Amino acid sequence: MDSELRILVLDDEPPIRKGICTLITHKLPSVHIVGQGSNGLEGLELYRSTQPNLIITDIVMPEMTGLEFLREVRKADLHTPCIVISGYDEFSYAREAIRLGATDYLLKPISSTELIRAIIKATDSAHEAKHTDYEELRSSASTLFLHRLLNGELVEIEKVLQACKTLEISLQEGAVTVITLASPNAEEITRALQWAQTRAVTVTQRGPHGVLFIQGSATRADHLAADILSLNLPALRVGIGQPVTTLSSVHISFESALQALTYQAYYPHERLFTQEMIDRSTPYLDSTDIDTLRLKEILLLGDEDELVTWFNTFFSSLFYIKTPPLSYLKGMCIYLLTTVHKHLGEDLGITKSYFDRVAPFNASTVVSIDDLYNEVLNHLVVLNNKVIVQAIADSDIVIHQAKQYVENHLTEIISSTEIAEKLKMSPTYFSTYFKTKTGQTFRSYVNSRRNEYAKSLLANITMSIEEISEQLGYTDYRSFHRIFKRMNSITPSEYRKRITKR
């Protein structure tokens, strides 16, 4: 992307205009906002005086609309890319915007990811020859609209209905039930969605799930689900959501359909999951009831038999009802592990990164109760037999205190002489001792920890790189830039751009 990108932003709503400018400044620090206007007339003056190489404009503005503004610009300039923004109910303007050379058409409320992606696309030379297709754009806008409906972001029913009409989505106000589809074979979901479309059903894909919007009675949803399961799609699983009476409540049906699918953890051989399977009892056991200090004591004693007995008691206590939600079980297990990690870290100086590397635990991959039980118990056994044993063997009060001091002073310039003085050792002996015990010099260790801290700060887009340099204790930005590039092979600004694109 052009490092000297100059953007003109037009929108008659100050909060939206300011939000767009703030977002661009935080996400793309090298970009310059050269002008802001509230209508097309202001935009023309700013365009002539600032000569931007990218325009972002709203469509509906007083005095002169965004389309009228673009027509005037195109009389003399056929090449400057433009990103057009509007509401769903104004999507009918899209064809004219495309004719006037718009590279993207963003729908309010604007997503930060969509905006940054559109800016990069508009300024990427690889896209210069690509013309936006209206049908492709309408399809993308429809998908985004349906996703926001599923998120519960759209509640004004008149605007929802107008958007459905403009985007040619066959949804009407009234009863609706959401069906969700899941399969390890993505092709099965695609085929099921294509089949549903032939039945005039509105569909979309949301992450790994297929989603169907079934209007009418709940019985119709049941029949369609049964028909889908009769297709030759053996790995497909179907979840039926709670019926709702209005389009603005679709998100409730969607969330309940996703919850129904999680009950595959209890019924691994079933393919259809309904609301009747969900146990809606309120949990009475919470995280404060877990005796993690006792678990820590058992781990430090190294008694594996007692560890298994404790865990079995804990896991059984979660089943105060027959089938508690899988999300609840995962949440309690995650709390258990993170808390015991914290206790062990405080006692033995074990870092989070060490836990993640030696005994990783990923709850998102767990799909059954047996998997959850085995994954958590195996994790605890690894802590008992490997992590704690190694930590105790490696424990050294001098090294522990030195590392703890570094963690508490990452924003300062730390010297081995300073540490040695606090530990009542000579600087030479401390440096040799640290290298012998850890396998790396004290300076290398400090730079490594400060480098990791710098990366975490760079992920915070509200801080400038200069501010980060100052917070890390560097006397000037160039020193930070030089050291960071030497350790990571890229500059701080390049690293920030890389992680903000993910």
Image (spheres, helix red, strand yellow):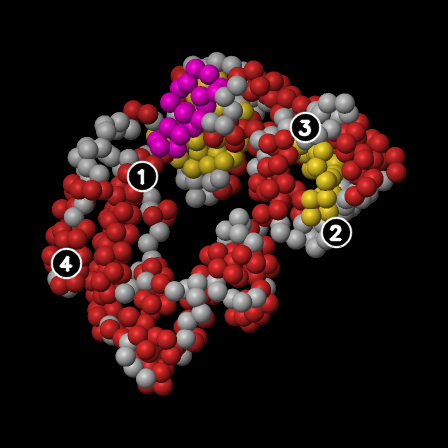
Label 1 residue SS: helix
* Image: 210 above or below 202: below
| Disc 1/disc 2 C-alpha distance (Å) | 45 Å
Circle number at residue 297: 4
Q: Marks 1 and 2: CB-CB under 8 Å?
A: no
Instruction: Find the magenta span and give its range.
Output: 242-260
Closest to the observer: 354 or 313? 354
Q: Is the magenta stretch mostly helix, strand or loop?
A: helix
Whether tag 4 and tag 2 are in contact, CB under 8 A, the answer is: no
Amino acid beneath label 3: Asp
Q: Name the amino acid, label 1.
A: Ser
Give the residue at mark 3.
12
* Residue 114 place in picture, x, y as percent: 60, 40
Q: Do the residues labelled 1 and 3 touch (CB within 8 Å)?
A: no
Q: Which of marks 4 and 2 is in front?
A: 4
What crowding class fits label 4: few (fewer than 14 Cα within 10 Å), some (14-19), or many (20 or more)? some
Q: Residue drawn at (79%, 29%), measured in percent from left and top?
A: 41
